[in-house]
Image (cartoon, grey):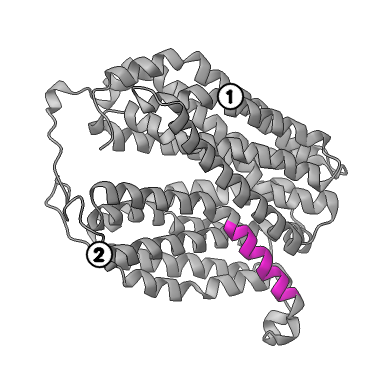
């Protein structure tokens, strides 16, 4: 379609559907997080096992599943691949309701994560076929915002679901009424999957490009004059360390907040799943919106000749603020104090994460973006999947202390975020030089 052409109904429908699927994706994960504490008591799980479920079960399994599913989506009708994945991940969410122990919880979570891993690569393949020019840029921003807000919105919705289930047990079918609330909510969220699968099938069928060509255009590249992956890493390893290294250590500090904040608050202050879900959901929505607003404001206020350099100016400060907030969790004596520290931390890291894509999109040569991004995702997944496990391990060492999870979160998060700030400062000159000589800008 022409760059200025108004997006079609099919394009708008696809974007709305992908946003809805993103929310469903987070709901499947967040039900597990909000229900962690009652599930732990019901199944006799320890914190190391919970960390393995949140880390290895979701992050690592998702990374392994994304590659083959994306390969299928590039070769067959993306709508059917996506619909099949929705049914599959929803089935595993439903099966979680009948889990009898750690092995079943880990298996159902891993299966869910593998199937869900197809959503993002398929979404970013669908949008360029339906949007172009400034409309594509706008659609990408909207989809990014949906992803950024998906977790906190899912927290709020999940808290409401737990409250509804607990208040209306008598109205539920007998087999659901006899279940603990975390099982009932898992079942209800899972059985909604086929409806969303039908929505996915309503997306317009994608045209296939000739081998080696893009649907919209072909970027002319003289391969003989461009560096290989090995050559580029050898020349630019300092710049890559400063950017991708910092992002990876931010993931270490950020991921435990997603996995452990709800059970930590429930355990320390006796909050119910409904209270935790609603409170943390509202907190994350507010902090995410403020973080996105700050990232936009930085770009407007700190305009430079090369806008990719703007995030480099503020990123080290944002990481430092987040590190201080993570360390402060140890001293929180009320849920209000915890939420205040986490609000500052999430705001800073959302602003950081919103600005970093512009840096590495500008940094990487166009013909190496896919290859180097795949390497980056693998490294990032390894870091993010390990940190919830580490929190669980440290927490077990402080067994009997109802602040153990907060101690563990601070012990992992604060040093990691401080090191991310150091990497950004130490390698900033190399990142600047690499951006200046990359010879490419995102289209």
Residue placed at 28% from the left, 26% from the top? 229
Residue placed at 52% from the left, 41% from the top? 293
Label placed on residue 2: none
Would residue 156 be counted in the magenta stretch? Answer: yes
Q: CA distance from mark 1 to mark 2?
A: 42 Å
> x, y percentage for residue 70?
33, 53
Camera-side residue: 426 or 233? 426
Query: What residue is pinned by disc 1?
Result: 317
Asked which secondary structure carries label 2, the reply is loop
> x, y percentage for residue 63?
45, 46
Q: Along the horizontal axis of the image, is 336 left or right of 238?
A: right
- Magenta segment: 153-166
Q: Quadrant of residue 188?
A: bottom right
Most distant residue in the front direction: 301
Q: Of helix, strand and loop, which mostly describes the magenta segment?
A: helix
Rendered-image quadrant of the C terminus = top left
Q: Is tag 1's residue or tag 2's residue first in the polypeptide sequence?
A: 2
**240 w.r.t. 348: above or below:** above
> Does residue 52 show up?
no
Question: Badge 2 local density, few (<14 within 10 Å), some, or many (20+)?
Answer: few
> x, y percentage for residue 330?
80, 34
Q: Along the horizontal axis of the image, is 11 left or right of 194?
A: left
> x, y percentage for residue 328?
76, 32
Q: Quadrant of residue 45?
A: bottom right
Asked which secondary structure carries label 1, the reply is helix
Query: What residue is pinned by disc 2?
Result: 8
Q: How many labels sit on residues? A: 2
Camera-side residue: 266 or 49? 266
Residue placed at 52% from the left, 47% from the top? 59
């Amino acid at each position: 379609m022409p760059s200025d052409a108004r997006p079609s109904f099919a394009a708008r429908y696809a974007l709305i559907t992908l946003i809805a699927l993103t929310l469903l994706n987070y709901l499947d994960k967040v039900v597990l997080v909000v229900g962690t504490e009652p599930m732990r008591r019901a199944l006799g799980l320890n914190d190391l096992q919970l960390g393995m479920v949140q880390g290895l079960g979701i992050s690592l399994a998702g990374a392994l599943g994304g590659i083959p599913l994306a390969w299928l989506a590039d070769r067959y009708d993306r709508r059917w691949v996506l619909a099949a994945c929705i049914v599959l991940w929803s089935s595993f969410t439903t099966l979680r309701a009948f889990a009898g122990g750690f092995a079943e919880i880990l298996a159902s979570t891993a299966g869910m994560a593998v199937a869900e891993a197809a959503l993002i690569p398929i979404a970013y393949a669908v949008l360029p076929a339906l949007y172009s020019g400034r409309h594509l840029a706008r659609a990408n921003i909207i989809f990014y915002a949906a992803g950024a807000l998906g977790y906190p919105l899912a927290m709020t919705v999940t808290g409401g679901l737990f409250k509804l289930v607990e208040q209306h047990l008598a109205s539920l079918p007998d087999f659901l009424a006899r279940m603990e609330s975390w099982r009932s909510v898992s079942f209800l969220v899972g059985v909604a999957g086929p409806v969303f699968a039908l929505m996915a099938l309503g997306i317009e069928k994608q045209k296939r490009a000739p081998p080696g060509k893009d649907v919209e255009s072909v970027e002319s590249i003289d391969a003989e004059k461009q560096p290989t992956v090995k050559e580029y890493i050898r020349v630019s390893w300092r710049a890559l360390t400063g950017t991708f290294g910092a992002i990876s250590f931010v993931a270490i500090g950020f991921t435990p907040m997603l996995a452990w904040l709800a059970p930590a608050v429930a355990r320390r202050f006796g909050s119910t799943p409904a209270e935790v879900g609603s409170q943390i959901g509202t907190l994350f929505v507010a902090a995410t919106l403020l973080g996105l607003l700050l990232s936009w404001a930085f770009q407007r206020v700190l305009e430079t000749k090369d806008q990719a350099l703007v995030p480099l100016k503020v990123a080290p400060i944002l990481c430092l603020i987040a590190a201080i907030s993570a360390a402060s969790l140890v001293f929180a004596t009320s849920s209000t104090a915890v939420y205040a520290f986490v609000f500052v931390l999430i705001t800073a890291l959302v602003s950081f994460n919103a600005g970093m894509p512009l840096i590495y999109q500008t940094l990487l040569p166009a013909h190496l973006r896919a290859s180097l991004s795949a390497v980056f995702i693998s490294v990032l997944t390894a870091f993010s999947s390990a940190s919830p496990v580490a929190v669980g391990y440290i927490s077990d060492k402080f067994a009997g202390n109802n602040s153990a999870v907060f101690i563990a979160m601070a012990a992992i998060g604060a040093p990691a975020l401080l090191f991310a700030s150091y990497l950004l400062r130490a390698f900033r000159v190399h990142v600047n030089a690499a951006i200046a000589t990359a010879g490419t800008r995102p289209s």
